[in-house]
Amino acid sequence: MFKSTAIISFFSIFGRISGYIRDVVIASYLGTGIYNDIFQACFRIPNFFRIIISEGITNLAFIPTYKSFDVNNNNSIAQKKNFTSSLFFFSLLIIVPIVLVIEIFMPQAINFFAPGFKNLDNYSLSILIARIIFPYTIFIVISSIFIGVLNSQKKFSITASIQIILNILICLALINFGNNQTDSIIAISYACLVSGFFQILILFYSIEKKFRVSFLVPKITKEIKQFLLILFPSFIIFFIFQFNKFLVYFLASYEVGAISYIYFSERIYQLPIGIISLSITTAMLPVITGYLQSNQFDEARNFFQKAFEYIMFFVIPSAFAFYFYSDLFVSTLFERGQFTNISTQNTANVLKVFAIGLPAYACIPIFTQFFIINNKIKLFLTINVIISLISLFLMIYLQGKNGYIGIIQGLIISYWGIFIAVVLYFFYDKFSFLTTKILYSIFVMFFSSIIMVIFLEYFLLSVELGKILTLLTIVTIGMIVYLLLNLIMNYQIINPIFNIILKRKK
């Protein structure tokens, strides 16, 4: 797991860096006004499918089915190729008509996803932007199949960094065609389409020739049926989980600027999610699937527990840093051009709330994998439905009291609700998840994070630095203090990381 996670994290960092450069450029050209609200809301529609399909259900449904061909090695290459090709053409037969229908009824789609826009003067612009961006969904579906093939073969570098293409093209579009805010938003919308085309080309040619999709008449084989049996319940789970985020943007569309504040704060707090949590879950899926197919249940459980522990190890100090230094993170990364000091204050307030829910949110991907792999989808689905309904009422109620901040407060409560419900189930099911060792590790992580913040506060009082140097100091010194404290109090969790470094030096 450590090697695969390191590879994914390494390339995810480059992807995230390019993503933040993209967001800095977008913030500079569009700020946090209605134009950025329109782009983020319209881009959210295909991005909604990307998160559900590409980052979620495709790997969970695709990898176990794809790897099942290895159990019987007779003609497994041809079987894999036929399975992927059939899935490819079935996907096109489904997604293309859906995209065409939504393109025709885009005003109704906008009213559904962002109802607050229909009362604005820029309503027609939002429909135009949505119509340009939405076909990007086709590329997302196609690329998700290719990503599934590459991840099954543990070729994580390309899949972890493929979003860099989108980020580069958006930046180039703004620099070359961003004469005004209207031109800027149209330019980056077309950049999304162009990037989708290049992404599938790169992914296609990254797959070994013998495994690539080829033209054939798609057939509903037993493997396709197996894939669909996992796909549909997984889709429902991910849809319900992402539906909470959809509600956030739905409610925020009634307040100009709210979507932008939420988006930019989300981009910061999801940094450890993208680099650590998703990297670990992506790396662990093929391994756990292999353990379960070989009936090695204890090994699968131990692997799962270790994944949880390492996610907490990186996420807990990140949550402390984002909460106590939210203004510094936002102002350093985004405050320039159209992104004003008011934008910084409002975005930082949202980031503080997100930071409180970060540890719970980071665990949801591995919890989802656990329930799907162990064929307990209905139970996890029930948990998500109940908590999502409660979350909906909380978001509406808290929005009335605290505005867009209240929406995020309701969302964070749902994250912790899912976390607590799953932990309680583990105790009921006698799944030794939160062992004494893991509880001690979490205590050490919280204690180390508190000491880290106290040390940083005293250190920053003694020096005067610019924003960029202050942020770099917080990240560097904070990391050193945190690692040293964990090294002293919980060496076992640090040891594997040192082993990787030492092996590389040799």
Image (cartoon, rainbow, N blue to C red):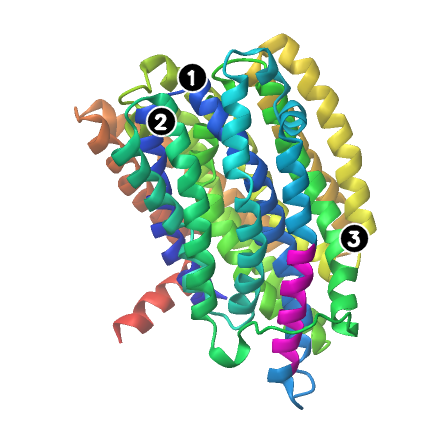
Q: Which type of secondary structure does the marked residue at label 2 adopt?
A: helix
Going by the numbered disc 2, the residue's amino acid type is: Asp
Q: Is residue 235 left or right of residue 2?
A: right
Going by the numbered disc 3, the residue's amino acid type is: Ile
- Residue placed under numbered mark 2 in the picture: 183
Q: Position of residue 292 (x, y in %)?
A: 70, 71
- Residue placed under numbered mark 1 in the picture: 33
Screen quadrant of the C terminus: bottom left
Mark 3–mark 1 contact, CB under 8 Å?
Answer: no
Residue 123 or residue 80, whichever sits in front: 123
What label does residue 12 carry, if any?
A: none
Q: Position of residue 315 (x, y in %)?
A: 48, 43
Marks 3 and 1, how far apart in space?
41 Å
Location of residue 243 (image quadrant): top right
Q: Which type of secondary structure does the marked residue at label 3 adopt?
A: helix
Where 483 falls versus 243 (above or below)?
Answer: below
Which region of the structure is painted magenta?
79-93
Mark 3 Cα-neighbour bin, 10 Å: few <14, some 14–19, many ≥20: many
Going by the numbered disc 1, the residue's amino acid type is: Gly
Mark 2 Cα-neighbour bin, 10 Å: few <14, some 14–19, many ≥20: some
Q: Position of residue 132 (x, y in %)?
A: 50, 36
Q: Which type of secondary structure does the marked residue at label 1 adopt?
A: loop
- Residue placed under numbered mark 3 in the picture: 377
Closer to the eye: label 3 or 1 = 1
Closer to the eye: label 3 or 2 = 2
**What residue is shown at x 71% (from left), y 75% (from top)?**
293
Q: Is residue 501 left or right of residue 118?
A: left
Where 499 falls versus 348 (above or below)?
Answer: below
